[in-house]
Image: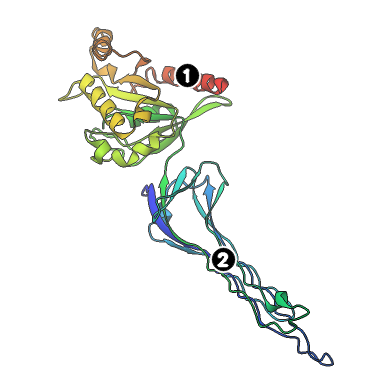
Amino acid sequence: MKFVDEASIEVIAGKGGEGCLSFRREKFIPQGGPNGGDGGDGGSVYLVADASLNTLVDFRFNRLFRAKHGEHGKGSECTGKNGQNLFVKVPVGTLVFDVETEEFLGDLVKPAQTLLVAQGGQHGLGNVHFKSSTNRTPRRTTKATPGENRTLRMELQVLADVGLLGLPNAGKSTFIRAVSAARPKVADYPFTTLHPYLGVVSIEIDRSFVIADIPGLIEGAAEGTGLGAQFLRHLSRTRLLLHIVDVAPLGSEPVQDILGIIQELEKYSPELAARERWLVLNKVDLLPPDEQVQHCQAIINELGWQGRVFEVSALARRGCMDVCYSIMNYLEEKDNES
């Protein structure tokens, strides 16, 4: 399935039913009074977070959602039926904006959470409401109101505890395959990953976390260059970033690669750049055994890196679980602090 993380839709709430202008016309009841009933309220449109969905692809072609109108009032003081509300399912993690006003309407982060996006119209009053001792034959009703009509922009931000960050072909997909059941495509060319993947890392019973792999970033990603630009938002919800680095890249230097990614993060979001970030030096098995430690230490020294550092080989699954245990402990400590 094609991954779509942004979509625009139009939602139209139902209009209210009109109030009825009616008088009693029954045998043996001369000069019957007013008995016009109220109309029904129009149906509203709600968005509902559904945990079984993970993409906005359903909205690529189905863009119009309309709730039912309220029924008109009837004689004998019969009230019209309310219009049926419309519930539109969206993935958990969906942000909703009004296109015309750019107003932020809500963030659906929990399964079954609902968000009202278009209010149904109010019903009109029948003439029975306007009878009095001085006006026994009122010919007055009130008009119903139309329902709201909005164009919405929806953005999906995946929900994950940990986000993988790095250049194309740094080994992010191989890492998530090594530690979880997620199976992103892995190949020996850049931009293999075309959309985000989520994997659940299970340490033991009742101890697990969710990790997200996004397309690799390149220079200019914050301005919209490359595949990773549109997916940077998926890192916004993560609590920890793992910066995956190829320690032996062809045609570039690891330190410059690391600094380039940090620069793109700072351009996109200073808040995201300031988030806890660990360095994972990958593909150490490509270095001669007697040079591995020295080479990795040289990278750390040149960067002046003060945070956590791990040396792994995702392909050989060497050192990967050590990273996962450290992540689990870190997340649990943060939960205990809060």
- For mark 1, what is the residue? 325
Q: Quadrant of residue 233?
A: top left
N-terminal-most mark, 2 or 1: 2
In the image, is residue 177 above or below residue 4?
Answer: above
Q: Does residue 78 appear in the picture of this structure? A: no
The residue shown at (43%, 36%) is 198
Q: Quadrant of residue 168?
A: top left
Q: Position of residue 61 (x, y in %)?
A: 38, 60
**Front position in the image: 179 or 135:** 135
- For mark 2, what is the residue? 121
320 to the left or right of 295:
right
Alpha carbon separation for disc pair 2 and 1: 54 Å
Task: Give amino acid for label 2.
Answer: Gly
Question: At numbered mark 1, what does the secondary structure look like: helix, strand or loop?
Answer: helix
> What colour scheme has been applied to the protein in the rendered image?
rainbow
27 to the left or right of 251:
right
Q: Position of residue 81 (x, y in %)?
A: 66, 71
Task: Give amino acid for label 1.
Answer: Tyr
